[in-house]
Image: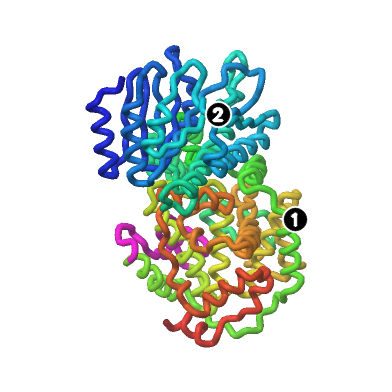
């Protein structure tokens, strides 16, 4: 029997719109993250609960775990009445493990005639498990007995009618371990994630037909709060990422002197590059990563995101250990993946269809002038994010431009054609800095530290923003294409000198540009990151063509493969909507966005040239 004072306390919290997280006798638990029109229940035997089945329920925003000999009828009536008072109906899903492994059957016990849409959604969802486990069978039984054998019903039929409730029972085959209780961890992860979504979709169908519906998407039925365990794991992973500062550690600090020496050597001797010291022990950092018990997190979406980020950081730490060694290149290929054939073909097409000669008259802009222009844009974001220190700094120890967190670093030797200035500002400030700032306002630190593989979308979006700003030139596209070609040459064992000569002699790049491209590709021992710029642009444009939301991409730093998960977290109110670049409000920019969404190709971006007024504005305003 549940103590009456506990029932009253829970009822009081629910009426006030508060969450509930209370212990029940014998290691039981009731959790209601938000008041929803459904509740999952698992009543376990006296000898103890099936922890893996309990883990399936813990993925939901509302559930009860309780020992079978504890009467929860009054508690359930109280909670269900609170739900019905708000939603006019309540779905209760009771789950229990199948006692044998002879048949791998999901048995659904449900009144089909009363809730056909709900039952069909559950059946179809469970049948989807065959993708990971083909032997699974789903049986639907139309019966009034919707509870485990040998156990009394949760409530009588009269009680369910009184609260407007529908109960469905699901007998779960224990395919996640064998007869000796050996746990199949990888299968269980997939099963947990899939069943989590199936239960939400089932509840959504029930709500759509039976309840007072204020939900527009099934993902709105998910958890809205981050547990202490999630926050701790997220923070600890982000700390490792920030301590490492990976990109800075694999970027040479002596580009200028190396270029001078390379010229003195008549371009025949591979230059020697120096790197920043590594202020950490990669082995100790890896140990810290795997001390984080991600398997204890109940949210499959967050677990997946954190686990994949941990794998990426482990690989980056290994790369730091292998810096300037042959293994670095192969690790780089594992980190950034192989360049798709479509991207290689696109690079070749760009180089073939565009001219290396730029006859347009250039207006030179030095580092001081560029930094002043960038500070005007930075000021917009400084006002929007007063809690962050956003700035522009001219530095001697970097080459070109680099973003570090919310700061734009400009080389003191940097020089650019003024025509490209606003485009590069939108690349660095309107993309990299803005997504960092938006990420800092999210409860997950990975949103600013960056989820695994985030570079590809970041660079693709940054290049697209160059086009939207009206400053994407043939020369810029040729540069991105050349990086793909150079990376491909390096992967196929071409050396520094051979790659440099090909860029200079065959592709007609200037000596300094050819050196810069080659240096970026060979830094650290062979770094394939630069191939993701064109690949990211290519995949981003396809994403937008298929109806993807541009707004979503500014929420933080992640890859296109994460979009569905990010939008799920937005639906669940875990993540916040982003602040967007003011540039997107311009009429000319809206027109360009519309053209991209209608299916422009990367090469066709060049046909939409900047207007005279935009050009003058980019220089003088």
Reply yes or no: does residue 533 show up in magenta. Answer: no
Horizontal and vertical percent for residue 556? 46, 55
Highlighted magenta segment, given as a residue range: 384-412
The quarter of the rendered structure image containing the C terminus is bottom left
The kind of secondary structure element at disc 1 is helix
Of 592 and 225, nearer the camera is 225
Mark sitting on residue 433: none
Residue at the extreme left:
5
Of 40 and 411, nearer the camera is 40
Q: Which residue is mark 2?
A: 143
Residue 246 in sight in this render: no
User: Neighbour class for label 2 at 10 Å: few (<14), some, many (≥20)?
Assistant: few
Left/right placement of residue 4 relative to residue 508 reads: left
Q: CA distance from mark 1 to mark 2?
A: 56 Å
Q: Residue at x 72, y 57 (%)?
A: 497
The answer to whether marks 1 and 2 mark residues whose Cβ atoms lie closer than 8 Å is no
The quarter of the rendered structure image containing the N terminus is top left
Residue at the extreme bottom:
612
Residue 36 in sight in this render: yes
> Looking at the image, is 121 positioned above or below residue 590?
above
Left/right placement of residue 160 relative to residue 592 reads: left
Horizontal and vertical percent for residue 241? 46, 44
The kind of secondary structure element at disc 2 is loop
Q: Residue at x 47, y 26 (%)?
A: 54
Q: Residue at x 53, y 62 (%)?
A: 549
Horizontal and vertical percent for residue 332? 63, 46
Residue 255: quadrant of the picture: bottom right
**Mark nearer the N terminus (1 vs 2):** 2
Mark sitting on residue 341: 1
């Amino acid at each position: 029997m549940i103590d009456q004072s506990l029932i009253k306390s829970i009822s009081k919290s629910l009426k006030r719109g508060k969450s509930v997280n209370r212990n029940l006798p014998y290691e039981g638990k009731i959790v209601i993250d938000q008041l929803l029109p459904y509740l999952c229940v698992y009543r376990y035997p006296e000898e103890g609960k099936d922890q893996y089945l309990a883990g399936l329920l813990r993925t939901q925003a509302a559930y009860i775990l309780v020992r079978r000999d504890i009467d929860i009828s009054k508690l359930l009536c109280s909670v269900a009445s609170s739900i019905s008072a708000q939603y006019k109906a309540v779905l209760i899903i009771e789950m229990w493990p199948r006692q044998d492994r002879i048949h791998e059957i999901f048995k659904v016990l449900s009144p089909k005639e009363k809730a056909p849409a709900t039952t069909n959604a559950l059946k179809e969802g469970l049948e989807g498990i065959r993708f990971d486990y083909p032997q699974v069978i789903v049986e639907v039984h139309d019966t009034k007995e919707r509870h485990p054998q040998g156990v009394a019903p949760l409530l009588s039929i009269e009680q369910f009618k009184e609260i407007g409730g529908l109960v469905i029972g699901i007998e779960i085959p224990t395919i996640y371990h064998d007869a000796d209780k050996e746990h199949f961890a990888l299968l269980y992860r997939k099963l947990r994630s899939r069943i989590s979504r199936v239960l939400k979709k089932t509840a959504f169908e029930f709500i759509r037909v039976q309840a007072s519906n204020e939900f527009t998407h099934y993902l709105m039925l998910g958890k809205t709060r981050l547990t202490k365990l999630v926050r701790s794991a997220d923070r600890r992973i982000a700390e490792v990422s920030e301590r490492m500062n990976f990109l800075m550690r694999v970027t040479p600090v002596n580009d200028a002197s190396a270029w001078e020496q390379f010229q003195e050597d008549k371009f025949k001797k591979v230059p020697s590059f120096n790197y920043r010291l590594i202020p950490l022990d990669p082995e100790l950092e890896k140990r810290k990563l795997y001390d984080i018990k991600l398997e204890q997190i109940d949210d499959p979406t967050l677990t997946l995101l954190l686990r994949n980020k941990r794998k990426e950081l482990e690989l980056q730490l290994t790369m730091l250990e292998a810096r300037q060694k042959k293994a670095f290149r192969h690790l780089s290929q594992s980190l950034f993946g192989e360049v798709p054939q479509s991207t290689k073909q696109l690079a070749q097409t760009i180089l073939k269809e565009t001219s290396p000669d730029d006859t347009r008259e250039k207006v030179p802009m030095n580092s001081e002038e560029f930094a002043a222009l960038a500070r005007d844009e930075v000021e917009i974001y400084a006002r929007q994010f007063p809690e962050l220190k956003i700035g522009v700094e001219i530095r001697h120890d970097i080459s070109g431009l680099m973003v570090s967190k919310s700061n734009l670093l400009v080389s003191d030797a940097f020089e650019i054609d003024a025509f490209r200035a606003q485009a590069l500002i939108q690349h660095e400030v309107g993309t990299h800095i803005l997504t960092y700032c938006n990420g800092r306002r999210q409860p997950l630190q990975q949103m600013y530290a960056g989820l695994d593989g985030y570079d590809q979308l970041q660079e693709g979006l940054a290049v697209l923003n160059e086009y939207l700003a009206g400053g994407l030139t043939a020369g810029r596209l040729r540069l991105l294409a050349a990086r793909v070609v150079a990376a491909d040459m390096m992967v196929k064992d071409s050396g520094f000198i051979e790659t440099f000569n090909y860029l200079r002699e065959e592709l007609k790049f200037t000596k300094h540009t050819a050196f810069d491209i080659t240096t970026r590709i060979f830094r650290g021992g062979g770094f394939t990151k630069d191939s993701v710029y064109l690949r990211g642009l290519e995949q981003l444009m396809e994403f937008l063509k298929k109806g993807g939301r541009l707004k979503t991409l500014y929420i933080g730093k992640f890859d296109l493969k994460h979009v569905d998960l990010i939008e799920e977290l937005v639906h669940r109110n875990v993540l916040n909507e982003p602040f967007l670049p003011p540039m997107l409000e311009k009429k000319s920019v809206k027109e360009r966005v519309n053209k991209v969404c209608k299916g422009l190709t990367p090469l066709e971006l060049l046909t939409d040239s900047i207007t005279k007024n935009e050009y003058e504005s980019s220089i003088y305003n």
